[in-house]
Image (cartoon, coloured by chain):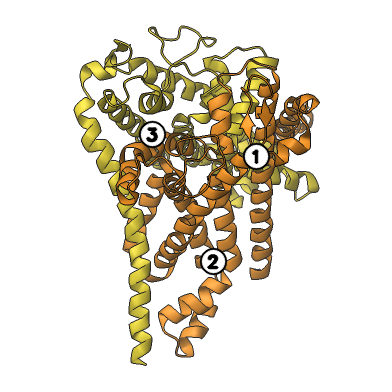
Amino acid sequence: MKKNYVSQFIGFTFLRFCVFIVIGILLIILWDVFSKGACAISWEFLTKAPTNGMTKGGIFPAIVGTFFVTVITAALSIPLGMGCAIFLNEYAKDTKITRLIRMSIRNLSGVPSIVYGLFGVVLFVQILNLSTSMLAAGMTLGLMTLPWTITASEEALKSIPNSYREGSLALGATKWQAIRTNVLPYSIPGMLTGVILGLSRAAGETAPILFTGAAFFLPFLPKSLSDQFMALPYHLYIMATQHHDIEGVRPLAYGTALVLITFVFGMNIFSVVLRYQLRKIKKE
Amino acid sequence: MRRVKDKMIHGLFFLNGIFVVAILLGIFSLLVFTAFPAFKEINILDFLTGSIWNPDAYLEPSYGIVPMLVSTFMVTLGALVVAIPIGIGAAAYLSDVASPRVREVTKPIIEILAGIPSVVIGFLGIVLVGPFIAKVFGLSNGLNAINGSILLAVMALPTIISMSEDALTSVPSNYEQASLALGATKWQTVIKVKIPAALSGIIAACMLGMGRAVGETMTVLMATGCAPAMPKGFLDSVRTMTSTIAIELGEVAYNSTHYYALFAVGLVLFIITFIINMTSDIILHKYEKVHR
């Protein structure tokens, strides 16, 4: 009997150790980036363009580029994703087509990001003739985030009790009226939280924008959707591997990594705060 | 009138749903159509079995994808060897050992880990993991298959942990209670009852983690050195399918044989990840049925 408890102790210690490793990995990542990136951060770093062959100056164009591309991504991904989720949760019955749609969503979320990049090059850059531009990159990212947006939106719709829909239908509303007045207002906070989480992952992606619009270096900000742009993740990639003075620009690379992580986490925190605020408004 | 409008809205949402299927088919067919011209000049057997990838050779360019298949396989295998035991261990801890409070704290931590951009992890592979590996093995630099494996393990861990944990928590509680009532310890119950009962879910989780590792680009591009030759061991630099596309697509002219060949690599990559994801999906569904 005692032997059993000794083995249990050893076993649980191993399991605990596994969790410690995972937490340790995260702490090492955050500690390294924050401790070495913090000294690169200054007002100048955040508001100036790179100068002297990207050995000095800041990353302002990259911040702006990533921000606008994320907006384009959202503009494509949110309406299409929510629409698809509404279809699946509100209208669709369990038919072959519905199952095919669900299967496609699961598979799309497993398609490697670089394959989305290839797809974007052929469809947006070549066939639709958008050239390598902010629009092409944003739309590529938009398609990539679509499965995440759908899944998150559907989760939110599922959490609305059926009585909400039935009450409205019983009063003579059409299906769409019931959805618009009694389902969507209550599910929007949950939808947005999940969607912003997906967008934050898109903001950190590099592979899909490598060939669809991200630029190595631009001395000016993009003026229209058909311009190329600098992006934070691509800038970090260049500073870490492609720069002629890699060791010399290490602090700048760390600074970029810190800003990128802060950008991504900032969006996560924003989504949590947004949900909290929207819930409060609804209760009043 | 109201009916007609409602029907139309229904139709719009239906089209929206079909659009998703169209994207998947679109990705596949565009890859096929763009890859196809490559095989006018390259023998498809040479492409699939050739062991030299040298499209820039002046006299006779060769397009053999075996070195990148081997590279991809190596880093993925290495990643799974690291990630599966740690992932399942952590999942078992969270579902069966941890107190609710510890679980509440740990779950967001794993989500944060999943949210770190791959390019940042690749960067840390260069500045942290690389020098460490170089020191341990006495190499001049640490950009090799092991480095890629470690980073891919970090990227696959959140997927494996959260899905395995879901599988473990959805095991009916009477399994656990029956085992404990027969006098088994909690540890014996976890190892001999819960993990076997959740095995198909756990396998599906590992397959999904594997799919992520195979398709991951930036970390392997930055941290494995990317020498195009056939790798001889884990301390060699490797160049996976994803990093080959990432390195070369920016340099080739549109609609050249080399360009088409890179799409052919992309097609192979798409098919491999598709098979992995479908297998994971099928396993998961079988498992859901068993438990209903």
- Please give left or right for residue A46 compared with residue B260 in the image: left
Closer to the eye: label 1 or 2: 1
**Letter of the chain that mark 2 sits on in the rendering:** B
Chain B painted colour: orange
**Residue B202: image location, x then y, percent:** 55, 62
Answer few, some or many: residues within 10 Å of disc 1's Cα (few below 14, many 20 plus, some between 14 and 19).
some
- Quadrant assignment, res A221: top left
- Quadrant assignment, res B64: top right
Mark 1: secondary structure: loop
- Quadrant assignment, res A97: top right
Quadrant of the drawing holding the C terminus of chain B:
bottom right
Answer few, some or many: residues within 10 Å of disc 2's Cα (few below 14, many 20 plus, some between 14 and 19).
some
- Please give left or right for residue B284 compared with residue A209 in the image: right
Chain A painted colour: yellow
Q: Nearer the viewer, residue A162 or A83?
A: A83
Q: Is residue A235 above or below residue B205?
A: above
Q: Which residue is mark 3?
A: A264
Residue at image point 34% right, 57% down: A21
Dot 1 amino acid type: Ser
Q: Which residue is mark 2?
A: B170
Q: Which residue is mark 1?
A: B51
Dot 3 amino acid type: Val
Quadrant of the drawing holding the N terminus of chain B:
top right
**Letter of the chain that mark 3 sits on in the rendering:** A
Question: Is any part of residue A171 visible from this angle?
Answer: no
Mark 2: secondary structure: loop
